[in-house]
Amino acid sequence: MAPALVEEYITRSSHPLSAFYHKIVAGERITREDAVTIYESDDLLAIGILADTARVLRTPPEVRDYVYWVHNFHINPTNICEAHCKFCSFKKGPGSPFAYVMSVDDVIKQVNDYPMKDQLSEFHIVSGLYKEQGLAYYRDLFKALKQHFPKVHIKGLTAVELDYLSKLEGIPVEETLAVLKEAGLGSLPGGGAEVFAERVRELVCVDKIPASEWLRIHGLAHQMGMQSNATLLAGLGETPEERIDHILAIREQQDKTGGFMTFIPLNCYYDNNAIDAKNALTGVENLKNFAISRILLDNVPHIKSFWIHIGEKISQVSLSFGVDDIDGTVVQEKIAHAAGTEASEAMTQAELVNMIRKAGKIPVERDTVYNIIRVYDEQLV
Ligand code: SF4
């Protein structure tokens, strides 16, 4: 729809969401009550207009059509985990024939075997909670990765893993972060947040740290000069209000410590785990989650749709619902695939570029902290 028509559609005084459009244009903060009303609307087009308006107005004009991606490589050092998250299809017990544990040398070899390793700018490292891989393992792993691939940023270990390592070593999280930062850790991924609502956590991940601790650990990282991401794992049986409260908790933390780069609404998959598939999100709910995240998070610069979770086509549509990042090339995604996502396990650079262009946007390769590596104008493939 042409911009003038878009404005006319949503600003008609009879449109039930027009007041929120005017609030966004005026730079006013959207409240919880506003968000619930927006989320309840079945006018998906209007919700998309609100989110895209928020994205456009909060983005510098020269980069408004940019959609970011990163050339990254996922490393999952073990699938053995002591926790019992009901949505997890990745975890194995130590005696399982499918359990694996990677030594530092195994990881280095895995990266070395990747033909495009010279083009990588990020390692995304998350793993199971396993006592044989304590702080010394991760310190040595990060040091070795930095020694072999000094230009590649390490985004590693969720707040849950950092809490586990700290308890294992009997030291405060601050100390764990300091050791890992010294070894090469650059930023934190957004995982482990799931849904912050205690009601849901008690049902699906009772042995995970509570929301307050997840947020505190990210705040500590921010105060130590490391940026981070944040996620929402929807489709666990949470209510729309609980999704909104989760996003608002991120906004509140961001007001205090300001280090979140990207918010990533994810959706659960149901193969090989104990979550009832009747909780599965519809495509419409996925788009609402992207949109409401962009509308509420006036202090977080980027909203990401992780194409591995939602597939390429909804990812493309999400770019009109507030999203400006679609993650990256990934290489060897294990976690969502263990749970049944039908998206492919990796996408080449050319495929990513093509996917973004076909959605009418300009593909931009970034590094982890959003320094621009390359703008893919029409000459570049
Ligand atoms: S989600 Fe993470 S912490 Fe929970 S069981 Fe799976 S690997 Fe362990």
Image (cartoon, helix red, strand yellow):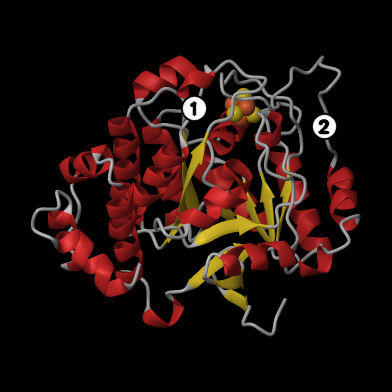
Please state the horizontal and vertical placement of residue 90, each as a whole percent of the image.
Answer: 69, 28
Location of residue 354 with respect to 245 vertically, above or below: below
Residue 181 makes an appearance in the image: yes
Q: Quadrant of residue 246?
A: top left
Mark 1–mark 2 Cα distance, whole angstroms, equals 31 Å
Residue 286 position (above or below residue 197):
below
Residue at 78% across, 18% down: 94
**Circle 1 residue:** 280
Q: Nearer the viewer, mark 1 or mark 2?
A: 1
Measured from the top left, where is residue 76 in percent x and y?
73, 40
Write the residue at 56% across / 18% down.
86
Task: Please rate how many residues cluster around mark 2, counting C-alpha atoms within 10 Å: few if below 14, some from 14 to 19, many from 20.
Answer: some
Where on the picture, by quarter, is residue 102? top right
Residue named by callout 2: 101
The answer to which of marks 1 and 2 sits earlier in the sequence is 2
Secondary structure beneath dot 1 equals: loop
Under circle 2, the secondary element is loop
